[in-house]
Image (cartoon, rainbow, N blue to C red):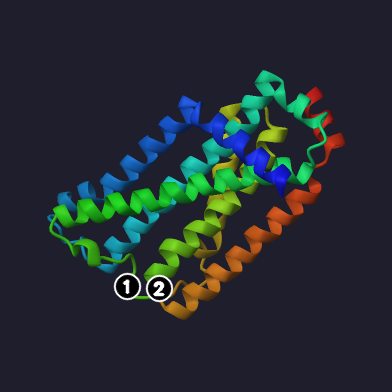
Amino acid sequence: MSDLGTMLWKEVTELFSNRRSLSVFVIAVLFMGVLPALTFSLHHGALLNSPLGAMIRLIYVLFATTIVVSQTAADMILHERVGHTLEYLLTTRVPEQAIFGAKVLLSFAIGYAAALAAMAIQLITTAIAGGAGFQWLFLGPGAGQVAAFGATACLSLYAAVIGTFVALRVGDQRAAYMVTVFAVAILAIPFLVGWVHFTLTVTWMSWATAAFGALAVLLALIGMFAFRRDMLVLYLQE
């Protein structure tokens, strides 16, 4: 745990000195928080408190999470690859699990923070636009809360694991970002082709979120044991 704490402190320090990652966070949160209100104003408020409007707001929050995590996870790896500090880190006694875990945990945390911040801004802009104000929920009682707080957390963890591994294998920032976003977009395929019937109920949302969370945790555990020094050295030499 001490190694993980040390690595987390290192990653947090480097993150707050990285202006690009912080800029992406601020821009993504502001845009995904304000754009729904602008969309609703163009429709004269007809969508403001409708189920479709709630879905649109949730999608914007998921976009904020995806954008921030995909950027942060890739940047933390590529920043060290460019500065050749990752090679030095691999020569220390710090376990691979602590190195990988710190990067994934921080990417997850910053992505989830982006989701919560975007939701808060949406609440404020919805109240200003004449909506339900601070009593507003995404998809209604229960199901909306599970989707807003549970699904975004699962998505953030999933993207953090994928983004970290992609950045280790892909040395280009834009390519790593696009591959991570594509991995997130794959999650929508079952819904688009009708394999999964989407139902806005507490039970369905709870089961779907639990299944997604289990998948994200499983990927994180696999990644933790697959994050090996010998393989990393080979990747860095390519």
Residue placed under numbered mark 1 in the picture: 140
Q: Position of residue 138 (x, y in %)?
A: 33, 65
The residue nearer to you, when weighing 228 against 189, is 228
The residue depicted at 60 percent of the width and 38 percent of the height is 9
Q: Are marks 1 and 2 in contact (CB under 8 Å)?
A: yes
| Image quadrant in which you'd find residue 212 | bottom right
The residue nearer to you, when weighing 6 against 68, is 6
Q: Position of residue 101 (x, y in %)?
A: 68, 46
79 is higher (above) or lower (below) than 48: above
Q: How many marks?
A: 2
* Crowd band around label 2 with a 10 angstrom C-alpha radius: few (<14), some (14–19), many (20+): many
Name which residue type carries label 1: Gly
Can residue 9 be seen here? The reply is: yes
CA separation in Å, label 1 and label 2: 6 Å
Can residue 63 be seen here? The reply is: no
The residue depicted at 55 percent of the width and 59 percent of the height is 154
The residue depicted at 51 percent of the width and 68 percent of the height is 194
Q: Is residue 197 left or right of residue 74?
A: left
Q: Position of residue 234 (x, y in %)?
A: 84, 29
Name which residue type carries label 2: Ala
Q: Is residue 38 left or right of residue 85?
A: left
Residue placed under numbered mark 2 in the picture: 143
Of the 4 image quadrants, the one containing the C terminus is top right
Numbered disc 1: secondary structure? loop
Numbered disc 2: secondary structure? helix
Q: Is residue 138 left or right of residue 163?
A: left
Q: Position of residue 232 (x, y in %)?
A: 80, 34
The residue depicted at 53 percent of the width and 52 percent of the height is 156
| Residue closest to the far front | 2
Q: Is residue 129 left or right of residue 60?
A: left
